[in-house]
Amino acid sequence: MVKIKWTSQSIEDLASIFEYIARDSHQIASIFVERLYFHTDQLIENPFSGRKVSEMKDKNVRELIYKNYRIVYRIINNDEIQILTVFNSFKLLDLRNFK
């Protein structure tokens, strides 16, 4: 079974998303972040369910879309996936984070 590990960057991203939404409603922010987090559970059974990230050449860097957010992850091996970053899909992926 695949383990999903969240990088420090992706955890910071979730915190920022929470803070942004919480300006309007703490409850909605909690629900949104929880649902986004659980959206990644599909990777446990099917790591390749996300599409390839068009900005990257690495076929193991993929993404899931949840609402207006891109959840970028890397398949490390058959046992591990790392969530690299989560950001609004209206923004461009900052490739400097993936060297």
Image (cartoon, helix red, strand yellow):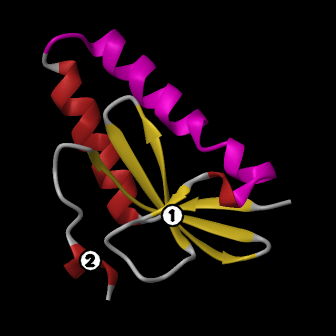
The percent position of residue 96, horizontal first and vertical second, equals: 20, 80
Residue 89: x %, y % from top left: 26, 44
Depth check: give the residue in front, 91 or 57: 57
Foreground label between 1 and 2: 1
- Between 31 and 57, the one nearer to me in the picture: 57
Q: Quadrant of residue 53?
A: bottom left
Q: Residues within 10 Å of mark 2 (few under 14, many from 20)?
A: few
Mark 1 or 2, nearer chain start:
1
The magenta region covers 24-47
Residue furthest to the bottom:
99
Q: Say whether residue 87 is magenta.
A: no
Question: Where residue 27 appears, x then y in whole percent?
Answer: 35, 10
User: What SS does tag 1 mark?
Assistant: strand
Amino acid at circle 2: Asn
Residue 10: % across, % down? 38, 57
Tag 2's secondary structure? helix
Q: Furthest residue to the right?
A: 1
Q: Main secondary structure of the magenta part?
A: helix
- Is 34 colored magenta in this rendering? yes
Residue placed under numbered mark 2 in the picture: 97
Q: Which quadrant would the C terminus be assigned to in this image? A: bottom left
Query: Residue 61 vs residue 47: left or right?
Result: left
Q: Is residue 30 left or right of residue 44?
A: left
**Are dots 1 and 2 in contact, CB under 8 Å?**
no
Residue holding disc 1: 62
Along the horizontal axis of the image, is 32 left or right of 91?
A: right
**Rendered residue at 44%/18% (across/down):** 31
12 up-or-down from 8: above or below: above
Q: Residues within 10 Å of mark 1 (few under 14, many from 20)?
A: many
Say which amino acid is labelled 1: Arg
